[in-house]
Image: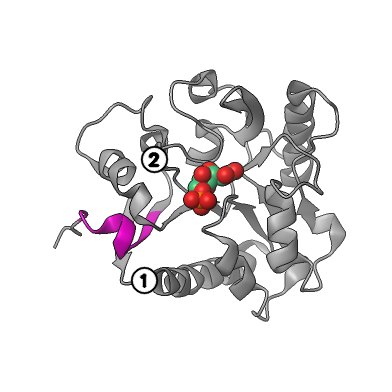
Amino acid sequence: MEKFLEVLPSKQNLIEKALAVVVPKIQVAIQERDVCTIALAGGSTPKPLYEALSQQNLPWSKIHVFWGDERYVAATSPESNQKMAVEAWLSRVEFPTANLHPIPTGANNPEIDAKSYEDELRRVFEVEQPRFDLILLGIGSDGHTASLFPHTDALKVRDRLVTVGSKDGRPRLTFTVSLINYARCVIFLVAGADKRHALDQVLAASADAMTYPSRLIQPQEGELWMLLDEAAGAEIRVAS
Ligand code: 6PG
């Protein structure tokens, strides 16, 4: 695993850096395999990155977009990660509908929708164990990532691609640790002082991964990028 960590002076600088990493990764994937597969993070941090991506001139028909997790709500809900990314980016460019793979939440049964999404992943990748070119992630102030929340059963699932997470008793659908760790490149985008404590624990030499699940993200055959703003990463010193 190749690790990269950078603390940027502001959130704007963080987004600019993220764009400078993501765009070439997309271009190289397309050069090498004629397709780029990317899984998006939800929450609020990545929204300006998605807005910046909508201004790029990329071969959208060669990019397949998935989501690393989703709240178990309708796609029209203001809580929907799909809705946020569609509004910030995907509806603003000529993205083929066939290339957008939102997580289904309509079965009124999270397990059924999780299995459906697993089937979709295997259909698109045409392999049993999909390897994403790029997976974007955030970190919560409790140290969670995707919908892999502290001390939940989802953290232990290794024989699935997608599983059911839980936040405050409400279901979410999430990539599993094993699917994320098989990616070629995983990029964490972390901004805000409220993330500082969790980040310190995630990056500490030792801390409990069940308490700080982002520690479980270790793409052994890939790259791990930690892009932080000063507010979140003030205590983190890049190894010189
Ligand atoms: C979600 C995200 C989640 C998010 C973190 C950080 O569904 O909310 O996937 O894992 O990345 O909670 O969220 P913010 O970017 O809003 O701080």
Can you say whether 88 is above or below 39 in the image? below
167 lies left or right of 78: left
Q: Position of residue 194 (x, y in %)?
A: 36, 49
Q: Can you see residue 183? A: no
103 lies left or right of 134: right
At x 36% / y 27%, what residue is drawn? Answer: 211
At x 85% / y 33%, what residue is drawn? Answer: 106
Query: Residue 50 lies in what quarter of the image?
Result: bottom right
Marks 1 & 2, CB-CB < 8 Å contact: no
Q: Does the beta carbon of the residue at mark 1 sit less than 8 Å from ligand 1?
A: no
Front-most of residues 11 and 216: 11
Query: Residue 95 lies in what quarter of the image?
Result: bottom right
Region rendered in magenta: 225-236
Taking the magenta stretch, the answer to whether it contains residue 1 is no
Q: Position of residue 101 (x, y in %)?
A: 77, 49
200 lies left or right of 56: left
Quadrant where the image shows the C terminus: bottom left
Which amino acid, by three-letter code, is at mark 2?
A: Gln
Mark 1 or 2, which is nearer the eye? 1
User: Which residue is labeled 2 in the image?
Assistant: 218
User: Which residue is labeled 1 in the image?
Assistant: 10
Q: Can you see residue 203? A: yes
Density class for disc 2 (Cα within 10 Å; few <14, some 14-19, many ≥20) is many
Q: Position of residue 198 (x, y in %)?
A: 33, 41
User: Which secondary structure, mark 1?
Assistant: loop
Tell me the distance, in whole angstroms, between the alpha carbons under discs 1 and 2.
26 Å
Density class for disc 1 (Cα within 10 Å; few <14, some 14-19, many ≥20) is some
At x 78% / y 29%, what residue is drawn? Answer: 113
Q: Position of residue 102 (x, y in %)?
A: 76, 47
Q: Does the beta carbon of the residue at mark 2 sit less than 8 Å from ligand 1?
A: no
